[in-house]
Image: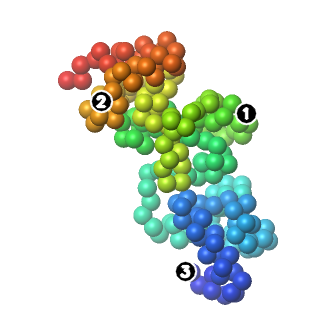
Amino acid sequence: MCCYARRMSSDDSARDRLWRVASRQRGYFTAAQAVTAGFSHQAQHHHVRQQHWLRVDRGLYRFREYLDLPGEATDHLVRWTLWSRDLAVASHTTALAVHDLGTANPSEVHLTVPTSFRRKEPAVVLHRATLEDIEIEQHEGFRVTTPVRAITECASDGVDQDILTSAVAEALDRGVLTRRRLLHTAQALGPQAELGVQRALNTDPS
Protein backbone atom coordinates (compact mmCIF):
# COMPACT_ATOMS: atom_id res chain seq x y z
CA MET A 1 0.00 0.00 0.00
CA CYS A 2 1.50 3.36 -0.96
CA CYS A 3 2.37 6.02 1.62
CA TYR A 4 -0.51 8.43 0.95
CA ALA A 5 -3.02 5.80 2.03
CA ARG A 6 -1.40 5.61 5.46
CA ARG A 7 -1.69 9.30 6.29
CA MET A 8 -5.15 9.14 7.75
CA SER A 9 -6.85 6.11 9.20
CA SER A 10 -10.15 7.31 7.68
CA ASP A 11 -8.54 7.13 4.23
CA ASP A 12 -7.11 3.68 4.95
CA SER A 13 -10.41 1.82 5.00
CA ALA A 14 -11.79 3.81 2.08
CA ARG A 15 -8.76 2.98 -0.04
CA ASP A 16 -8.92 -0.68 0.93
CA ARG A 17 -12.54 -0.84 -0.14
CA LEU A 18 -11.81 0.90 -3.44
CA TRP A 19 -8.74 -1.23 -4.07
CA ARG A 20 -10.78 -4.41 -3.69
CA VAL A 21 -13.20 -3.17 -6.34
CA ALA A 22 -10.46 -1.94 -8.68
CA SER A 23 -8.44 -5.15 -8.34
CA ARG A 24 -11.27 -6.99 -10.09
CA GLN A 25 -11.19 -4.38 -12.85
CA ARG A 26 -7.46 -4.28 -13.71
CA GLY A 27 -7.03 -1.22 -11.50
CA TYR A 28 -9.81 0.83 -13.08
CA PHE A 29 -12.70 2.33 -11.15
CA THR A 30 -15.42 4.91 -11.62
CA ALA A 31 -16.13 8.07 -9.66
CA ALA A 32 -19.35 6.47 -8.45
CA GLN A 33 -17.43 3.46 -7.14
CA ALA A 34 -15.01 5.80 -5.36
CA VAL A 35 -17.91 7.61 -3.69
CA THR A 36 -19.37 4.29 -2.56
CA ALA A 37 -15.99 3.33 -1.10
CA GLY A 38 -15.88 6.56 0.89
CA PHE A 39 -14.08 9.15 -1.26
CA SER A 40 -15.87 12.48 -1.67
CA HIS A 41 -15.59 14.28 -5.01
CA GLN A 42 -13.20 16.72 -3.35
CA ALA A 43 -11.02 13.83 -2.20
CA GLN A 44 -11.10 12.37 -5.70
CA HIS A 45 -9.80 15.63 -7.18
CA HIS A 46 -7.03 15.64 -4.57
CA HIS A 47 -5.82 12.14 -5.46
CA VAL A 48 -5.85 12.99 -9.17
CA ARG A 49 -3.87 16.19 -8.58
CA GLN A 50 -1.36 14.27 -6.48
CA GLN A 51 -1.15 11.66 -9.28
CA HIS A 52 -2.16 8.87 -6.92
CA TRP A 53 -4.94 8.14 -9.39
CA LEU A 54 -4.74 8.44 -13.16
CA ARG A 55 -7.68 10.11 -14.86
CA VAL A 56 -8.59 7.92 -17.84
CA ASP A 57 -11.81 9.60 -18.89
CA ARG A 58 -14.56 11.67 -17.37
CA GLY A 59 -15.50 9.94 -14.13
CA LEU A 60 -13.07 7.06 -14.80
CA TYR A 61 -9.76 6.49 -13.03
CA ARG A 62 -7.02 3.94 -12.52
CA PHE A 63 -4.71 3.33 -9.60
CA ARG A 64 -1.23 4.55 -10.49
CA GLU A 65 0.33 1.34 -9.16
CA TYR A 66 -1.06 -0.56 -12.12
CA LEU A 67 1.42 1.18 -14.41
CA ASP A 68 4.15 -0.84 -12.69
CA LEU A 69 2.29 -4.16 -12.90
CA PRO A 70 2.35 -6.50 -15.91
CA GLY A 71 -0.56 -5.62 -18.15
CA GLU A 72 -2.71 -7.81 -20.34
CA ALA A 73 -3.82 -7.27 -23.91
CA THR A 74 -7.44 -7.05 -22.76
CA ASP A 75 -6.94 -4.35 -20.10
CA HIS A 76 -8.51 -1.73 -22.36
CA LEU A 77 -11.72 -3.76 -22.57
CA VAL A 78 -12.22 -3.31 -18.83
CA ARG A 79 -11.88 0.44 -19.34
CA TRP A 80 -14.58 0.43 -22.05
CA THR A 81 -16.85 -1.78 -19.97
CA LEU A 82 -16.78 0.79 -17.17
CA TRP A 83 -17.27 3.62 -19.69
CA SER A 84 -20.44 1.87 -20.88
CA ARG A 85 -21.66 1.42 -17.29
CA ASP A 86 -21.25 -2.35 -17.65
CA LEU A 87 -23.57 -2.52 -20.66
CA ALA A 88 -21.05 -3.18 -23.43
CA VAL A 89 -19.87 -6.60 -24.57
CA ALA A 90 -16.66 -6.99 -26.61
CA SER A 91 -17.73 -8.42 -29.95
CA HIS A 92 -16.99 -8.98 -33.65
CA THR A 93 -13.27 -8.95 -34.54
CA THR A 94 -12.42 -7.73 -31.03
CA ALA A 95 -14.02 -10.91 -29.68
CA LEU A 96 -12.12 -13.03 -32.22
CA ALA A 97 -8.88 -11.49 -30.94
CA VAL A 98 -9.86 -12.17 -27.31
CA HIS A 99 -10.52 -15.81 -28.17
CA ASP A 100 -7.32 -15.92 -30.27
CA LEU A 101 -9.22 -17.19 -33.29
CA GLY A 102 -7.71 -16.66 -36.72
CA THR A 103 -5.87 -13.62 -37.97
CA ALA A 104 -8.11 -10.87 -36.61
CA ASN A 105 -6.07 -7.92 -35.35
CA PRO A 106 -8.57 -5.06 -35.21
CA SER A 107 -7.31 -1.51 -34.94
CA GLU A 108 -10.66 -0.48 -33.45
CA VAL A 109 -12.52 -1.80 -30.43
CA HIS A 110 -15.87 -3.35 -31.32
CA LEU A 111 -18.56 -3.38 -28.66
CA THR A 112 -22.15 -4.59 -28.73
CA VAL A 113 -24.50 -2.48 -26.65
CA PRO A 114 -28.26 -2.51 -26.05
CA THR A 115 -30.40 -0.79 -28.65
CA SER A 116 -31.29 1.92 -26.12
CA PHE A 117 -27.62 2.82 -25.51
CA ARG A 118 -26.99 6.50 -26.31
CA ARG A 119 -23.36 7.24 -25.41
CA LYS A 120 -20.92 7.83 -28.27
CA GLU A 121 -17.16 7.63 -28.47
CA PRO A 122 -15.04 7.88 -31.66
CA ALA A 123 -12.47 5.42 -30.27
CA VAL A 124 -14.92 2.50 -30.39
CA VAL A 125 -17.26 0.94 -32.93
CA LEU A 126 -20.68 0.33 -31.42
CA HIS A 127 -23.06 -2.39 -32.60
CA ARG A 128 -26.57 -2.32 -31.20
CA ALA A 129 -28.21 -5.66 -30.54
CA THR A 130 -29.90 -7.70 -27.84
CA LEU A 131 -27.64 -10.54 -26.75
CA GLU A 132 -28.80 -13.64 -24.93
CA ASP A 133 -26.88 -14.85 -21.87
CA ILE A 134 -25.82 -17.95 -23.81
CA GLU A 135 -24.04 -15.70 -26.32
CA ILE A 136 -21.82 -14.04 -23.71
CA GLU A 137 -18.77 -15.14 -21.74
CA GLN A 138 -17.61 -13.43 -18.55
CA HIS A 139 -13.91 -12.62 -18.35
CA GLU A 140 -12.07 -10.72 -15.62
CA GLY A 141 -13.56 -7.24 -15.69
CA PHE A 142 -15.33 -7.49 -19.03
CA ARG A 143 -17.71 -9.59 -21.10
CA VAL A 144 -17.19 -10.93 -24.60
CA THR A 145 -19.36 -12.71 -27.16
CA THR A 146 -18.79 -16.45 -27.43
CA PRO A 147 -16.68 -17.82 -30.30
CA VAL A 148 -19.73 -18.97 -32.28
CA ARG A 149 -21.45 -15.61 -31.83
CA ALA A 150 -18.26 -13.71 -32.66
CA ILE A 151 -17.75 -15.62 -35.90
CA THR A 152 -21.34 -15.33 -37.06
CA GLU A 153 -21.69 -11.63 -36.19
CA CYS A 154 -18.50 -10.97 -38.14
CA ALA A 155 -19.96 -12.86 -41.09
CA SER A 156 -23.19 -10.88 -40.80
CA ASP A 157 -21.22 -7.62 -40.90
CA GLY A 158 -19.24 -8.65 -43.98
CA VAL A 159 -15.84 -8.96 -42.33
CA ASP A 160 -13.01 -9.92 -44.70
CA GLN A 161 -13.51 -13.53 -45.76
CA ASP A 162 -9.89 -14.51 -45.04
CA ILE A 163 -10.31 -13.39 -41.42
CA LEU A 164 -13.56 -15.30 -41.16
CA THR A 165 -12.15 -18.45 -42.75
CA SER A 166 -9.11 -18.50 -40.46
CA ALA A 167 -11.30 -18.06 -37.39
CA VAL A 168 -13.64 -20.88 -38.42
CA ALA A 169 -10.72 -23.22 -39.17
CA GLU A 170 -9.12 -22.62 -35.77
CA ALA A 171 -12.40 -22.90 -33.88
CA LEU A 172 -13.15 -26.25 -35.50
CA ASP A 173 -9.59 -27.49 -35.02
CA ARG A 174 -9.68 -26.63 -31.31
CA GLY A 175 -13.14 -28.15 -30.85
CA VAL A 176 -14.58 -24.82 -29.72
CA LEU A 177 -17.70 -25.39 -31.81
CA THR A 178 -19.22 -27.76 -34.36
CA ARG A 179 -20.11 -27.16 -38.00
CA ARG A 180 -23.76 -27.81 -37.24
CA ARG A 181 -23.91 -25.31 -34.39
CA LEU A 182 -22.04 -22.71 -36.43
CA LEU A 183 -24.41 -23.04 -39.37
CA HIS A 184 -27.49 -22.97 -37.15
CA THR A 185 -26.30 -19.78 -35.44
CA ALA A 186 -25.43 -18.16 -38.76
CA GLN A 187 -28.84 -18.95 -40.21
CA ALA A 188 -30.48 -17.21 -37.26
CA LEU A 189 -28.52 -14.02 -38.04
CA GLY A 190 -29.56 -13.89 -41.68
CA PRO A 191 -28.45 -14.65 -45.26
CA GLN A 192 -25.16 -12.72 -45.18
CA ALA A 193 -24.01 -14.48 -42.03
CA GLU A 194 -24.98 -17.86 -43.48
CA LEU A 195 -23.18 -17.14 -46.77
CA GLY A 196 -19.97 -16.05 -45.05
CA VAL A 197 -19.94 -19.10 -42.80
CA GLN A 198 -20.71 -21.46 -45.70
CA ARG A 199 -17.79 -20.03 -47.67
CA ALA A 200 -15.50 -20.44 -44.67
CA LEU A 201 -16.59 -24.05 -44.16
CA ASN A 202 -16.13 -24.86 -47.84
CA THR A 203 -12.59 -23.46 -47.94
CA ASP A 204 -9.82 -25.98 -47.57
CA PRO A 205 -7.47 -24.44 -44.96
CA SER A 206 -4.53 -26.36 -46.38
**Quarter occupied by residue 4:** bottom right
Q: How is the image coloured?
A: rainbow
Instruction: Choose mark 1 or mark 3, whichever is in front.
Output: 1
Q: Secondary structure at mark 3?
A: loop
Residue 185 position within the rendered picture, expressed as x and y whole percent measured from the top left: 46, 23
Marks 1 and 2, how far apart in space? 35 Å
How many callouts does the rendering have?
3
Q: Which residue is mark 2?
A: 172
Q: Which residue is mark 3?
A: 1
Q: Nearer the viewer, residue 2 or 182?
A: 182
Earlier-in-chain disc, 1 versus 3: 3
Residue count near mark 1 (Cα–Cα under 10 Å), binned few <14, some 14–19, many ≥20:
few
- Vertical position of residue 26 compared to residue 13: above or below: above
Single out the residue that lies furthest toward the left.
206
Answer whether labels 2 and 3 touch (C-beta < 8 Å).
Answer: no
Residue at image point 73% right, 72% down? 38
Work out which quarter of the rendered image holds the C terminus and state it.
top left
**Left or right: where does residue 76 sit relative to residue 197?**
right
Identity, as a three-letter code, of the amino acid under mark 1? Ser
Q: Secondary structure at mark 1?
A: loop
Q: Which residue is mark 1?
A: 116
Q: Secondary structure at mark 2?
A: helix
Earlier-in-chain disc, 1 versus 2: 1
**Quarter occupied by residue 87:** top right
Residue 46 position within the rendered picture, expressed as x and y whole percent measured from the top left: 73, 74
Marks 2 and 3, how far apart in space? 46 Å
Q: Nearer the viewer, residue 149 or 110?
A: 149
- Vertical position of residue 20 compared to residue 115: above or below: below
Residue at image point 78% right, 68% down? 41
Earlier-in-chain disc, 2 versus 3: 3
